[in-house]
Image: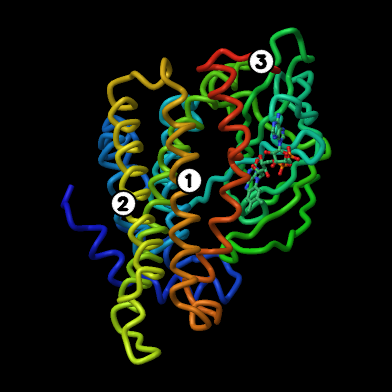
Amino acid sequence: MEKDWVSKFTSKYDEIYYDHVSEKNEFPEDFFSALGADNRFGLLVSNKNGGSEISFSEFVQNILDMSRRAGTLTYYFVAQNLSAKLFDDHGTEKLRSLLPEVMAGKAKVNLALTEEQSGADALSINTEAVQTGDGNYSITGDKYCVTNGKGADYLMVAARTSPPSDKKSHGLTTFVITEKQPAKTSFVSLGKMGLNFLPLYSVSFNGVKVSRDAVLGEIDRAWSFLSRTFAADRLALGAMFVGMGRMALDRAAEYAREREVFGRKIGSNQGIQFPLARAFIELSASEAYILRGSEMMDNGEIDRNRDIPMGAYYHSVNAASMAIDAALQTLGASGYLSGFVEKLYRDIRYYRMGPISEQLALVSIAERTLNMPGAKE
Ligand SMILES: Cc1cc2nc3c(=O)[nH]c(=O)nc-3n(C[C@H](O)[C@H](O)[C@H](O)COP(=O)(O)OP(=O)(O)OC[C@H]3O[C@@H](n4cnc5c(N)ncnc54)[C@H](O)[C@@H]3O)c2cc1C
Protein backbone atom coordinates (compact mmCIF):
# COMPACT_ATOMS: atom_id res chain seq x y z
CA MET A 1 0.00 0.00 0.00
CA GLU A 2 1.41 3.38 -0.95
CA LYS A 3 2.67 5.28 2.08
CA ASP A 4 1.47 8.78 1.30
CA TRP A 5 -2.16 8.05 0.39
CA VAL A 6 -3.38 9.84 3.53
CA SER A 7 -1.55 13.05 2.70
CA LYS A 8 -2.99 12.97 -0.84
CA PHE A 9 -6.46 12.27 0.53
CA THR A 10 -6.31 15.03 3.14
CA SER A 11 -5.03 17.58 0.66
CA LYS A 12 -8.71 17.66 -0.40
CA TYR A 13 -10.42 16.56 2.83
CA ASP A 14 -8.74 19.04 5.14
CA GLU A 15 -9.59 21.59 7.87
CA ILE A 16 -11.65 23.66 5.45
CA TYR A 17 -13.71 20.67 4.35
CA TYR A 18 -14.22 19.55 7.97
CA ASP A 19 -15.38 23.03 8.92
CA HIS A 20 -17.67 23.21 5.90
CA VAL A 21 -19.48 19.87 6.40
CA SER A 22 -19.81 20.58 10.12
CA GLU A 23 -21.60 23.83 9.27
CA LYS A 24 -23.97 21.96 6.94
CA ASN A 25 -25.14 19.43 9.57
CA GLU A 26 -25.07 16.61 7.05
CA PHE A 27 -23.50 13.20 6.58
CA PRO A 28 -20.24 13.81 4.62
CA GLU A 29 -21.24 11.70 1.60
CA ASP A 30 -18.34 12.72 -0.63
CA PHE A 31 -15.71 12.09 2.08
CA PHE A 32 -17.19 8.65 2.76
CA SER A 33 -17.54 7.72 -0.94
CA ALA A 34 -14.01 8.91 -1.69
CA LEU A 35 -12.60 6.59 0.99
CA GLY A 36 -14.66 3.71 -0.41
CA ALA A 37 -13.67 4.43 -4.01
CA ASP A 38 -10.05 4.41 -2.86
CA ASN A 39 -10.54 0.95 -1.21
CA ARG A 40 -9.86 2.29 2.29
CA PHE A 41 -12.62 0.49 4.19
CA GLY A 42 -11.20 -3.02 3.97
CA LEU A 43 -7.82 -2.23 5.46
CA LEU A 44 -8.17 -4.74 8.31
CA VAL A 45 -10.10 -7.36 6.32
CA SER A 46 -8.26 -10.55 5.41
CA ASN A 47 -6.83 -10.95 1.91
CA LYS A 48 -8.97 -14.05 1.41
CA ASN A 49 -12.11 -11.92 1.75
CA GLY A 50 -10.79 -9.18 -0.53
CA GLY A 51 -9.27 -6.85 2.09
CA SER A 52 -5.82 -5.29 2.42
CA GLU A 53 -5.02 -6.99 5.76
CA ILE A 54 -2.65 -4.30 6.99
CA SER A 55 -1.45 -4.42 10.59
CA PHE A 56 -3.40 -2.63 13.29
CA SER A 57 -0.35 -0.42 13.91
CA GLU A 58 -0.36 0.69 10.28
CA PHE A 59 -4.09 1.40 10.48
CA VAL A 60 -3.52 3.52 13.58
CA GLN A 61 -0.76 5.45 11.81
CA ASN A 62 -3.26 6.25 9.03
CA ILE A 63 -5.68 7.55 11.68
CA LEU A 64 -3.03 9.74 13.31
CA ASP A 65 -2.20 11.27 9.93
CA MET A 66 -5.77 11.66 8.68
CA SER A 67 -7.20 13.25 11.82
CA ARG A 68 -4.51 15.94 11.90
CA ARG A 69 -6.14 17.38 8.76
CA ALA A 70 -9.68 15.99 8.59
CA GLY A 71 -10.33 16.13 12.35
CA THR A 72 -13.29 14.22 13.72
CA LEU A 73 -14.46 13.14 10.27
CA THR A 74 -11.86 10.40 10.71
CA TYR A 75 -14.47 8.71 12.92
CA TYR A 76 -16.10 7.29 9.77
CA PHE A 77 -12.79 5.82 8.60
CA VAL A 78 -12.40 4.14 12.01
CA ALA A 79 -15.97 2.88 12.36
CA GLN A 80 -16.43 1.47 8.86
CA ASN A 81 -13.06 -0.34 8.94
CA LEU A 82 -13.80 -1.89 12.35
CA SER A 83 -17.28 -2.93 11.20
CA ALA A 84 -15.83 -4.57 8.09
CA LYS A 85 -13.38 -6.42 10.33
CA LEU A 86 -16.30 -7.70 12.43
CA PHE A 87 -18.01 -9.06 9.31
CA ASP A 88 -14.72 -10.67 8.26
CA ASP A 89 -13.93 -12.26 11.63
CA HIS A 90 -17.40 -13.13 12.93
CA GLY A 91 -19.84 -12.93 10.02
CA THR A 92 -21.78 -15.85 8.59
CA GLU A 93 -21.29 -16.63 4.91
CA LYS A 94 -24.23 -14.32 4.15
CA LEU A 95 -22.65 -11.42 6.06
CA ARG A 96 -19.23 -11.99 4.53
CA SER A 97 -20.86 -11.83 1.09
CA LEU A 98 -21.77 -8.20 1.90
CA LEU A 99 -18.13 -7.26 2.45
CA PRO A 100 -17.41 -6.00 -1.10
CA GLU A 101 -20.14 -3.34 -0.71
CA VAL A 102 -18.97 -2.43 2.79
CA MET A 103 -15.32 -2.13 1.75
CA ALA A 104 -16.27 -0.01 -1.28
CA GLY A 105 -18.27 2.37 0.93
CA LYS A 106 -21.47 1.53 -0.95
CA ALA A 107 -23.10 0.30 2.25
CA LYS A 108 -22.78 2.10 5.57
CA VAL A 109 -22.60 -0.03 8.70
CA ASN A 110 -23.59 1.30 12.13
CA LEU A 111 -24.10 -0.07 15.62
CA ALA A 112 -27.24 0.14 17.77
CA LEU A 113 -26.22 -0.93 21.26
CA THR A 114 -27.06 1.83 23.76
CA GLU A 115 -30.50 2.15 25.35
CA GLU A 116 -31.74 5.11 27.30
CA GLN A 117 -32.49 3.27 30.54
CA SER A 118 -29.24 1.26 30.62
CA GLY A 119 -26.87 4.03 29.42
CA ALA A 120 -23.23 3.11 29.87
CA ASP A 121 -24.22 -0.23 31.47
CA ALA A 122 -24.52 -1.90 28.08
CA LEU A 123 -24.98 -5.36 29.55
CA SER A 124 -28.35 -4.27 30.98
CA ILE A 125 -30.06 -3.65 27.65
CA ASN A 126 -33.71 -4.71 27.28
CA THR A 127 -34.11 -5.06 23.50
CA GLU A 128 -35.15 -8.64 22.86
CA ALA A 129 -34.76 -10.98 19.92
CA VAL A 130 -37.21 -13.87 20.02
CA GLN A 131 -36.88 -16.91 17.80
CA THR A 132 -39.86 -17.41 15.49
CA GLY A 133 -41.29 -20.74 14.25
CA ASP A 134 -39.17 -20.64 11.07
CA GLY A 135 -35.91 -20.42 13.06
CA ASN A 136 -35.40 -16.72 12.34
CA TYR A 137 -35.68 -13.88 14.89
CA SER A 138 -37.96 -10.97 15.67
CA ILE A 139 -36.44 -7.88 17.37
CA THR A 140 -38.35 -5.54 19.67
CA GLY A 141 -36.91 -2.68 21.70
CA ASP A 142 -35.76 0.94 21.76
CA LYS A 143 -32.22 2.03 20.97
CA TYR A 144 -30.91 5.47 21.78
CA CYS A 145 -28.20 7.67 20.26
CA VAL A 146 -27.53 5.55 17.18
CA THR A 147 -25.04 7.20 14.85
CA ASN A 148 -26.49 7.37 11.35
CA GLY A 149 -29.38 5.13 12.51
CA LYS A 150 -31.68 6.16 9.68
CA GLY A 151 -28.99 6.22 7.00
CA ALA A 152 -27.43 2.85 7.86
CA ASP A 153 -27.58 0.21 5.13
CA TYR A 154 -26.61 -2.47 7.62
CA LEU A 155 -27.44 -1.91 11.26
CA MET A 156 -25.76 -4.12 13.85
CA VAL A 157 -28.25 -4.48 16.69
CA ALA A 158 -27.37 -5.93 20.08
CA ALA A 159 -30.29 -7.75 21.67
CA ARG A 160 -31.00 -10.10 24.51
CA THR A 161 -31.61 -13.67 23.36
CA SER A 162 -31.55 -15.27 26.83
CA PRO A 163 -32.66 -13.82 30.16
CA PRO A 164 -29.99 -12.20 32.34
CA SER A 165 -28.15 -14.73 34.50
CA ASP A 166 -25.37 -14.53 37.09
CA LYS A 167 -22.96 -13.84 34.26
CA LYS A 168 -24.37 -10.59 32.90
CA SER A 169 -22.44 -10.78 29.64
CA HIS A 170 -24.14 -14.05 28.68
CA GLY A 171 -27.33 -13.93 26.62
CA LEU A 172 -26.54 -11.06 24.25
CA THR A 173 -26.48 -11.52 20.47
CA THR A 174 -25.59 -9.12 17.67
CA PHE A 175 -27.85 -9.27 14.62
CA VAL A 176 -27.35 -7.38 11.39
CA ILE A 177 -30.45 -5.85 9.84
CA THR A 178 -29.52 -5.86 6.17
CA GLU A 179 -32.37 -3.68 4.98
CA LYS A 180 -32.22 0.12 5.12
CA GLN A 181 -35.06 1.57 7.23
CA PRO A 182 -36.87 -1.78 7.54
CA ALA A 183 -40.61 -2.10 8.16
CA LYS A 184 -41.77 -1.89 11.80
CA THR A 185 -38.93 0.50 12.66
CA SER A 186 -39.24 4.15 13.62
CA PHE A 187 -36.58 6.85 13.90
CA VAL A 188 -36.41 10.08 15.85
CA SER A 189 -33.66 12.55 15.00
CA LEU A 190 -31.72 13.91 18.03
CA GLY A 191 -30.19 17.39 18.25
CA LYS A 192 -26.77 17.75 19.89
CA MET A 193 -23.92 20.02 20.92
CA GLY A 194 -21.30 19.11 18.28
CA LEU A 195 -20.34 16.36 15.80
CA ASN A 196 -22.66 18.08 13.34
CA PHE A 197 -21.73 15.78 10.45
CA LEU A 198 -22.88 12.77 12.47
CA PRO A 199 -26.66 12.31 12.37
CA LEU A 200 -27.97 10.77 15.58
CA TYR A 201 -31.25 8.88 16.09
CA SER A 202 -33.38 6.99 18.53
CA VAL A 203 -34.43 3.82 16.76
CA SER A 204 -37.42 1.68 17.82
CA PHE A 205 -37.94 -1.87 16.59
CA ASN A 206 -41.36 -3.42 16.86
CA GLY A 207 -41.08 -7.05 15.78
CA VAL A 208 -38.48 -6.53 13.03
CA LYS A 209 -37.68 -9.81 11.28
CA VAL A 210 -34.05 -10.80 10.97
CA SER A 211 -32.78 -14.00 9.46
CA ARG A 212 -30.87 -16.62 11.47
CA ASP A 213 -27.88 -16.23 9.18
CA ALA A 214 -27.56 -12.49 9.83
CA VAL A 215 -25.82 -13.02 13.17
CA LEU A 216 -22.32 -11.93 14.12
CA GLY A 217 -20.58 -14.58 16.19
CA GLU A 218 -22.57 -17.00 18.28
CA ILE A 219 -26.05 -16.64 19.74
CA ASP A 220 -25.85 -15.45 23.39
CA ARG A 221 -22.11 -14.77 23.16
CA ALA A 222 -21.84 -11.36 21.51
CA TRP A 223 -19.97 -9.83 24.41
CA SER A 224 -16.80 -11.86 23.92
CA PHE A 225 -16.08 -10.41 20.48
CA LEU A 226 -17.71 -7.02 21.03
CA SER A 227 -15.45 -6.33 23.99
CA ARG A 228 -12.41 -7.17 21.84
CA THR A 229 -13.66 -4.81 19.13
CA PHE A 230 -14.18 -2.11 21.74
CA ALA A 231 -10.52 -2.47 22.77
CA ALA A 232 -9.51 -1.82 19.14
CA ASP A 233 -11.99 1.07 18.99
CA ARG A 234 -10.46 2.71 22.10
CA LEU A 235 -6.99 2.68 20.52
CA ALA A 236 -8.22 3.81 17.11
CA LEU A 237 -10.27 6.67 18.56
CA GLY A 238 -7.37 7.57 20.84
CA ALA A 239 -5.25 8.03 17.70
CA MET A 240 -7.98 10.27 16.27
CA PHE A 241 -7.96 12.41 19.43
CA VAL A 242 -4.20 12.89 19.13
CA GLY A 243 -4.68 14.06 15.54
CA MET A 244 -7.48 16.43 16.57
CA GLY A 245 -5.29 17.90 19.31
CA ARG A 246 -2.42 18.39 16.86
CA MET A 247 -4.72 19.98 14.31
CA ALA A 248 -5.69 22.64 16.88
CA LEU A 249 -2.12 22.99 18.12
CA ASP A 250 -0.75 23.53 14.59
CA ARG A 251 -3.22 26.37 14.09
CA ALA A 252 -2.52 27.91 17.51
CA ALA A 253 1.27 27.83 17.09
CA GLU A 254 0.95 29.44 13.67
CA TYR A 255 -1.30 32.17 15.09
CA ALA A 256 1.01 32.73 18.08
CA ARG A 257 3.95 33.26 15.71
CA GLU A 258 2.06 35.87 13.69
CA ARG A 259 -0.41 37.72 15.90
CA GLU A 260 0.94 40.93 17.37
CA VAL A 261 -0.62 42.86 20.28
CA PHE A 262 0.95 45.22 22.83
CA GLY A 263 3.73 45.70 20.31
CA ARG A 264 4.98 42.08 20.29
CA LYS A 265 4.07 38.63 19.00
CA ILE A 266 1.73 36.87 21.42
CA GLY A 267 3.91 33.74 21.03
CA SER A 268 6.76 35.55 22.78
CA ASN A 269 4.78 35.44 26.06
CA GLN A 270 5.35 32.40 28.24
CA GLY A 271 1.66 32.54 29.16
CA ILE A 272 0.96 31.55 25.55
CA GLN A 273 3.99 29.29 25.04
CA PHE A 274 3.68 27.01 28.06
CA PRO A 275 0.13 25.67 27.60
CA LEU A 276 0.92 24.86 23.97
CA ALA A 277 4.25 23.23 24.83
CA ARG A 278 2.54 21.21 27.58
CA ALA A 279 -0.14 20.10 25.12
CA PHE A 280 2.58 19.01 22.68
CA ILE A 281 4.19 16.84 25.39
CA GLU A 282 0.89 15.26 26.46
CA LEU A 283 -0.10 14.48 22.87
CA SER A 284 3.30 12.86 22.25
CA ALA A 285 2.83 10.73 25.38
CA SER A 286 -0.64 9.70 24.19
CA GLU A 287 0.75 8.74 20.81
CA ALA A 288 3.40 6.54 22.43
CA TYR A 289 0.73 4.90 24.62
CA ILE A 290 -1.48 4.21 21.59
CA LEU A 291 1.36 2.88 19.45
CA ARG A 292 2.40 0.52 22.25
CA GLY A 293 -1.21 -0.70 22.52
CA SER A 294 -1.40 -1.16 18.75
CA GLU A 295 1.75 -3.26 18.78
CA MET A 296 0.19 -5.40 21.52
CA MET A 297 -2.96 -5.71 19.42
CA ASP A 298 -0.85 -6.97 16.50
CA ASN A 299 0.96 -9.44 18.78
CA GLY A 300 -2.26 -10.83 20.28
CA GLU A 301 -1.40 -9.45 23.73
CA ILE A 302 -4.29 -7.04 24.23
CA ASP A 303 -6.77 -9.51 25.78
CA ARG A 304 -4.40 -9.92 28.73
CA ASN A 305 -3.76 -6.17 28.95
CA ARG A 306 -7.16 -4.47 28.74
CA ASP A 307 -5.86 -1.58 30.85
CA ILE A 308 -3.82 -0.42 27.84
CA PRO A 309 -6.71 0.59 25.53
CA MET A 310 -8.62 2.04 28.49
CA GLY A 311 -5.61 4.02 29.70
CA ALA A 312 -4.61 5.14 26.21
CA TYR A 313 -8.16 6.32 25.50
CA TYR A 314 -8.33 8.19 28.81
CA HIS A 315 -4.95 9.81 28.32
CA SER A 316 -5.49 10.83 24.72
CA VAL A 317 -9.00 12.27 25.14
CA ASN A 318 -7.68 14.40 28.00
CA ALA A 319 -4.52 15.43 26.15
CA ALA A 320 -6.58 16.42 23.11
CA SER A 321 -9.13 18.32 25.23
CA MET A 322 -6.31 20.23 26.88
CA ALA A 323 -4.61 20.97 23.54
CA ILE A 324 -7.82 22.17 21.89
CA ASP A 325 -8.68 24.33 24.89
CA ALA A 326 -5.17 25.86 24.91
CA ALA A 327 -5.46 26.48 21.17
CA LEU A 328 -8.80 28.22 21.61
CA GLN A 329 -7.36 30.44 24.35
CA THR A 330 -4.42 31.32 22.08
CA LEU A 331 -6.72 32.22 19.20
CA GLY A 332 -8.81 34.46 21.44
CA ALA A 333 -11.93 35.86 19.82
CA SER A 334 -10.91 34.52 16.41
CA GLY A 335 -11.02 31.00 17.86
CA TYR A 336 -14.44 31.52 19.39
CA LEU A 337 -15.87 32.64 16.05
CA SER A 338 -17.06 29.86 13.72
CA GLY A 339 -14.15 27.81 12.48
CA PHE A 340 -12.56 24.40 12.80
CA VAL A 341 -11.07 24.93 16.28
CA GLU A 342 -14.41 25.71 17.94
CA LYS A 343 -15.80 22.62 16.17
CA LEU A 344 -13.00 20.45 17.51
CA TYR A 345 -13.73 21.89 20.96
CA ARG A 346 -17.38 20.81 20.80
CA ASP A 347 -16.60 17.46 19.16
CA ILE A 348 -13.94 16.34 21.64
CA ARG A 349 -16.27 17.00 24.56
CA TYR A 350 -18.47 14.05 23.61
CA TYR A 351 -15.58 11.61 23.68
CA ARG A 352 -14.99 12.24 27.37
CA MET A 353 -18.37 10.57 27.97
CA GLY A 354 -18.59 8.00 25.18
CA PRO A 355 -18.19 5.49 23.72
CA ILE A 356 -16.36 4.91 27.01
CA SER A 357 -16.57 7.63 29.63
CA GLU A 358 -13.56 8.88 31.55
CA GLN A 359 -15.04 7.59 34.78
CA LEU A 360 -15.70 4.11 33.41
CA ALA A 361 -12.19 3.91 31.97
CA LEU A 362 -10.90 4.65 35.47
CA VAL A 363 -13.38 2.20 37.05
CA SER A 364 -12.14 -0.52 34.70
CA ILE A 365 -8.50 0.03 35.64
CA ALA A 366 -9.30 0.32 39.36
CA GLU A 367 -11.38 -2.84 39.47
CA ARG A 368 -9.82 -5.10 36.84
CA THR A 369 -6.18 -4.08 36.94
CA LEU A 370 -5.73 -2.81 40.49
CA ASN A 371 -8.24 -5.38 41.76
CA MET A 372 -10.20 -2.97 43.93
CA PRO A 373 -13.72 -3.93 45.01
CA GLY A 374 -16.61 -2.80 42.81
CA ALA A 375 -19.47 -3.89 40.61
CA LYS A 376 -17.52 -6.49 38.62
CA GLU A 377 -19.44 -8.74 36.33
C1 LIG B 1 -22.76 11.75 19.61
C2 LIG B 1 -23.08 10.40 20.15
C3 LIG B 1 -22.92 9.27 19.34
C4 LIG B 1 -23.26 8.01 19.83
N1 LIG B 1 -23.20 6.94 18.97
C5 LIG B 1 -23.65 5.74 19.40
C6 LIG B 1 -23.78 4.63 18.48
O1 LIG B 1 -23.49 4.75 17.29
N2 LIG B 1 -24.25 3.46 18.96
C7 LIG B 1 -24.61 3.28 20.25
O2 LIG B 1 -25.03 2.19 20.61
N3 LIG B 1 -24.51 4.30 21.16
C8 LIG B 1 -24.06 5.52 20.76
N4 LIG B 1 -24.00 6.59 21.64
C9 LIG B 1 -24.31 6.37 23.03
C10 LIG B 1 -23.07 6.45 23.91
O3 LIG B 1 -22.25 5.35 23.68
C11 LIG B 1 -23.55 6.59 25.36
O4 LIG B 1 -23.89 7.94 25.52
C12 LIG B 1 -22.55 6.19 26.35
O5 LIG B 1 -22.39 4.81 26.30
C13 LIG B 1 -22.89 6.60 27.77
O6 LIG B 1 -24.22 6.37 28.15
P1 LIG B 1 -25.08 7.55 28.83
O7 LIG B 1 -24.74 8.80 28.14
O8 LIG B 1 -26.50 7.17 28.88
O9 LIG B 1 -24.47 7.68 30.29
P2 LIG B 1 -25.04 7.19 31.71
O10 LIG B 1 -24.89 5.72 31.83
O11 LIG B 1 -26.38 7.77 31.99
O12 LIG B 1 -23.98 7.88 32.68
C14 LIG B 1 -24.06 9.26 33.05
C15 LIG B 1 -22.76 9.66 33.71
O13 LIG B 1 -22.53 8.84 34.87
C16 LIG B 1 -21.25 8.24 34.79
N5 LIG B 1 -21.26 6.93 35.43
C17 LIG B 1 -22.09 5.88 35.18
N6 LIG B 1 -21.75 4.83 35.95
C18 LIG B 1 -20.68 5.21 36.69
C19 LIG B 1 -19.85 4.57 37.66
N7 LIG B 1 -20.05 3.30 38.01
N8 LIG B 1 -18.84 5.27 38.21
C20 LIG B 1 -18.62 6.56 37.86
N9 LIG B 1 -19.36 7.22 36.95
C21 LIG B 1 -20.37 6.56 36.37
C22 LIG B 1 -20.97 8.13 33.30
O14 LIG B 1 -19.58 8.03 33.05
C23 LIG B 1 -21.56 9.44 32.79
O15 LIG B 1 -20.64 10.48 32.98
C24 LIG B 1 -23.71 7.86 21.17
C25 LIG B 1 -23.87 8.99 21.99
C26 LIG B 1 -23.59 10.24 21.48
C27 LIG B 1 -23.84 11.45 22.36
Which residue appears farthest toward the bottom when viewing the image?
263
Q: In this rendered view, identify the residue nearer to me: 331 or 162.
A: 331
Q: Quadrant of the C terminus?
A: top right
Asked which quadrant contains residue 125, the reply is top right
Q: Is residue 235 above or below residue 299?
A: below
Q: Position of residue 14 (x, y in %)?
A: 36, 70
- What amino acid is labelled 3 in the image? Lys
Q: CA distance from mark 3 to mark 1?
A: 28 Å
- What amino acid is labelled 1 in the image? Ala
Q: Position of residue 127 (x, y in %)?
A: 78, 31
Mark sitting on residue 376? 3
SS for tag 1?
Answer: helix
Q: Position of residue 32 (x, y in %)?
A: 44, 60
Residue occupying image coordinates x 48% and y 45%: 79
Q: CA distance from mark 2 to mark 3?
A: 41 Å
Which residue appears farthest toward the left when viewing the image?
2
Q: Position of residue 293 (x, y in %)?
A: 35, 31
The residue wearing badge 1 is 79
User: Are there few (<14), some (14-19), or many (20+) residues within 10 Å of tag 1?
Assistant: some
User: Are there few (<14), some (14-19), or many (20+) residues within 10 Å of tag 3?
Assistant: few
Q: Earlier in the sequence, mark 3 or mark 1?
A: 1
The residue wearing badge 2 is 39
